[in-house]
Amino acid sequence: MVWIVTGGPFCGKIRLMKGKGEVSLNHLKLKAVSLLFSAVLLAGCGLTDEKITMKPETGESIQVTLDRGDDFSMEASSGVLVVYQKKKVMMRCAFISREQEQAQRASIITMPFEIHREEENYISYSMAGPDGMVNYYMYPVGKKTWLYAATHLPPEAAEKVLSRIHFKEGSE
């Protein structure tokens, strides 16, 4: 390989001679910038957040944002939001009113259950279901709307899934 400088000191015409081919420094810079730009675009593919706007019966619009890292995705159907990881269902989420949340809390005591965490506006609990243990989460995501989420994941894993989902009231 031989570097040949042509022109004056500020010309920037450096040519790389290798066998029969000749490549200018400007051409190399252009290729490097193109390659870097492509790498940045590819690095961002699939890593952007996914957003869906839910319109529950409460009348509010709830924008749901999911961190899509680790092959997470989501879809909405018939008012239910389903969160997936690598096409496996991780969690199902419904959006209910305050009255429905209170009725659900009242019905919990009629069945065997275990509360993991309970606060005024938050409850997580588990109950045995036909397909095994189900963990539930209820908390407000709007002025009139509550999240009602269910999963077969253990509480620690379910909390990690929930930490990827963000809710914002009134967004389109």
Image (cartoon, grey):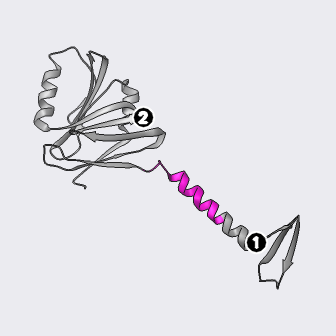
| Real-space Cα separation, disc 2 to disc 1, in angstroms | 46 Å
**Position in image of residue 136 (x %, y %):** 27, 27
Q: Is residue 144 above or below residue 32?
A: above
Quarter where residue 98 is shown:
top left
Quarter where residue 33 is shown:
bottom right
Task: Decide if residue 103 is on the left or right side of residue 43.
Answer: left
| Quadrant of the frame with the C terminus | bottom left
Q: Amino acid at mark 2?
A: Gln
Which SS type dominates the magenta stretch?
Answer: helix
Count of picture labels: 2
* Residue position for label 2: 85
**Position in image of residue 114 (x %, y %):** 27, 18
Q: Residue at x 38, y 35 (%)?
A: 84
Q: Which residues are magenta?
A: 33-48
Q: Is residue 47 magenta?
A: yes
Q: Residue at x 55, y 53 (%)?
A: 42
**Position in image of residue 120 (x %, y %):** 20, 34
**Position in image of residue 54 (x %, y %):** 23, 46
* Residue position for label 1: 25
